[in-house]
Image: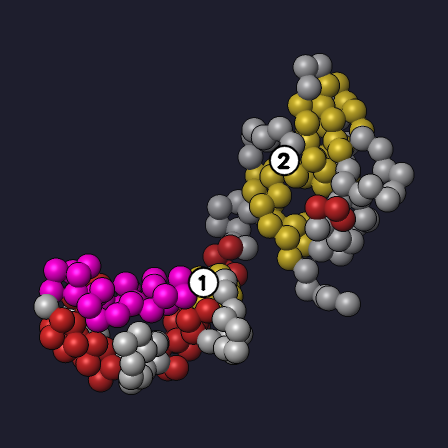
Amino acid sequence: MEPLTEKQQQVLTLIEERLAEGEPPSQREIADVFGMVQNSVYQLIGYLQQKGYLADNKGHRGLRLSKAYAEKKQASEGIPIIGRVAAGQPILAQENVEAYLDLDRAFSSSRGRFLLRVAGDSMIDDGILDGDLVLVQPCKKIENGAISVVLIDDDATVKRVYKQKYRIALKPSNKKSRYKTMYFKAFDKDIRMVGKVVGCLRMHVK
């Protein structure tokens, strides 16, 4: 695709943001945002269509990203997150894309993050199932009540951590089970906070 001028990029960015919100802008609205006359906006949109960024759609609010640009954007930015589904519209319509998730970036170890596979069902009420992978952000301080990975002796466990005056409570999240909250002395050397759970990945759905 041909490169864009600064103004063309600004207009394209605005259109993308409004499409993500499910409200494609009119030419008059674009003109108002940038302090331009509507005829200039019409020309800019024409250039964006000629360069392959916008589809050649008609109508007052007919602005749409071209299929080629949408596919290129998805490839570079990740998997689309569908924020809204309008009745009667395909679920993957470009105007329903809220944002893109770059899995390489989200699950990167560049910031010290790592994945742990969960064994057991003690956290299923929080949506963490047996066999899931949890994304862990190592940190020294754990917020009260945060889902965290804790090392007890040499065994890692995922629980909600509550810091009390003289002890630490590790609380499970499974009301239908007989799992009980575990308590440890605040300065017990056998327990160590590893990090906070910031994501969960499920590879197999039954």
Q: Is residue 140 left or right of residue 184?
A: left
Spot occupied by residue 33 in the image (x, y as percentages of width and height): 19, 59
Residue for badge 2: 146
Q: CA distance from mark 1 to mark 2?
A: 27 Å
Residue drawn 78% across the image and 53% down it: 130
**Residue 160, relative to residue 93: is it above or below?**
above
Compared to residue 196, the image places residue 182 above or below, namely above
First of labels 1, 2 by sequence position: 1
Tag 1: amino acid? Glu
Horizontal placement of 49 versus 131: left or right?
left
Q: Which colour assignment does the render follow? A: secondary structure
Query: Image quadrant of residue 181?
Result: top right
Tell me the magenta residue range. 11-36
Q: Residues within 10 Å of mark 1 (few under 14, many from 20)?
A: some
Identify the residue shown where x is 50% and y is 71%.
Answer: 86
- The answer to whether any part of residue 177 appears in the image is yes
Res 78 seen here: no
Which mark is on residue 98?
Answer: 1
Verify whether residue 12 appears in magenta.
Answer: yes
Q: Closest to the observer: 172 or 140?
A: 172
